[in-house]
Image (cartoon, grey):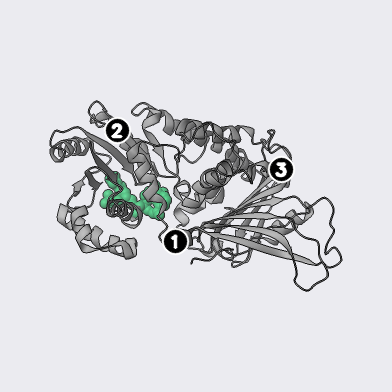
Amino acid sequence: MAYTIVIFGASGDLTSRKLIPALYSLFKKDKLDQLVRIVGVSRSPFGHDEYRLALRETTKKFAGKLFDEASWDAFSENIYYQPGDIKQSADFDALAGFLSEIEEGQPAGRVYYLSTMPQLYEEAIVQLGGAGLADDSDGFRRVIIEKPFGTDLATAQALNESIHKVFREDQIYRIDHYLGKETVQNIFALRFANSIFEPLWNRNYVDHVQITVAEEVVIGRRAGYYDSAGILRDMFQNHILQLMMITAMEPPARYDAALVRDEKVKVLHSVRKMTGADFASNTVRGQYHGYLQEEGVPPGSQTETYAALKLYCDNWRWKGVPFYLRSGKAMSCRTTQIVIQFRQVPHILFGEKTRTPVGNRLVIQVQPAEGIQLHFEAKVPESEMKTRTSTLDFDFNETSGGTMPDAYQRLLLDAILGDASLFARSDEVELAWGIIDPILAAWRSPAAPQLFPYEPGFWGPSEANGWMGDQKREWFDVCPVLTKS
Ligand SMILES: NC(=O)c1ccc[n+]([C@@H]2O[C@H](COP(=O)([O-])OP(=O)(O)OC[C@H]3O[C@@H](n4cnc5c(N)ncnc54)[C@H](OP(=O)(O)O)[C@@H]3O)[C@@H](O)[C@H]2O)c1
């Protein structure tokens, strides 16, 4: 069966920077075994050829070395543009007519990609339903929804409710592009395709886990969105909790969307709810110096650009093991990493006079370079019996011949093939909001913990280091342990 991918937000940044280059790369690598038509929809006036030409330039730029004219010409023959306003039902009737025309009345599967403003998601879904475009009697109908999915639990629930009136849950693909990254999927392989890590992956051997998403950039001109969202909504509810779920989940019986997501959801169920004094003792809030001077930021804004949380999973595997989650803008570098900090050996035989070994660490680096680094103690040559930390590196890029696919390639292909393992389910999204909402409420209350200022270019407020120090732990503040090969 042929497929049609309808992209709402056709003239937008995500479409030109990620979606079309990803689809082109899949085409070029022969991963699309059937005819795939792409229909871009937005209000801007383009003709088909004009749209193809605009995408040719951006794809050339973003697909890099992979781009060549001949394959682009073949690929772009099946790109179309249909002007339309999500707010106009007549435009959806016109879209329905256009789709039937290009599909020539033949059965075709369809993926609707909502790459437009979040305020339009609900309306787009209602309109798709109204125009009969959700009817899957002659081919599958799936909808991919970009982040953010709601701005709190109530809005996420309302959005789920509206979508479920038009699409069944198995037709809905809520995207979190972190899950499309090879290294994130490699966590499944690392944990469940090896026998040497899993026996150690629990409270008996792990002291704590750190998940860091650090960004070097400041908010720039995004104050309109950022000041009302803040870092908890922007990073924690989605990406960081996703990384935590995959790190903490139990092995599923089979690698299957329902079972994988069941196990992820169990992690969220086990997260201990913060109450009372926890909001001050288990969180750190920060704002970089200069945030209040960014264009569009309201005077005196208390929005966090840095946050650190300590969460516990109250279950057999993780009871008592803290998960430290942190993210910040204006940090010292861009890196996303998961650090599994193993316990110290029970009795230190070597090197106790000069230094205390920190214990083994497994660093899973999600970006910029993707890979894994294992830290272990080894003897210093020609010393009596001193040890130092040595590393074993696995660089994903090197082993893949220097062509790591962009996350959107994997996710688009999975959505076309109907594999929802790497997409968020409705209960997952709502449970994640259920963890973040109370923290947001506490931080917005008169008893909110102090908002600590920090200098751009470092690792957030010094108070966050003191907070870790008070717990006899320290942040793993290392800019990418692996650099792009
Ligand atoms: N850009 C990224 O890297 C990125 C990353 C992660 C998630 N996202 C999410 O992806 C979505 C799209 O982001 P973006 O950066 O591509 O946004 P964008 O550049 O602002 O594009 C928005 C698109 O929506 C279209 N649009 C706006 N109003 C419309 C209407 N009434 N009817 C039909 N189309 C309409 C715009 O086209 P016209 O003005 O021509 O109608 C444009 O094509 C957002 O939800 C964002 O949160 C983006």
Q: Counting other residues with Cα less than 10 Å from the Cα at mark 3, is it few (<14), some (14-19), or many (20 or more)?
A: many
Looking at the image, which is closer to me, 377 or 305?
Answer: 377
**Residue position for label 2:** 141
Q: Answer yes or no: do the residues labelled 1 and 3 have beta carbons within 8 Å?
A: no
Residue 124 location (% of width, % of height):
31, 37
Q: Secondary structure at mark 2?
A: strand
Of helix, strand and loop, which one carries label 1? loop
**Residue identified by numbered label 1:** 221
Label whose residue precedes the other's in the sequence (2 or 1): 2
Residue underneath mark 3? 321
Instruction: Please give left or right for residue 271 compared with residue 94 in the image.
Output: right
Q: Amino acid at mark 3?
A: Val
| Front position in the image: 173 or 11 | 173
Element type at mark 3: loop
Which corner quadrant of the image does residue 202 belong to?
A: top right
- Amino acid at pointer 2: Arg
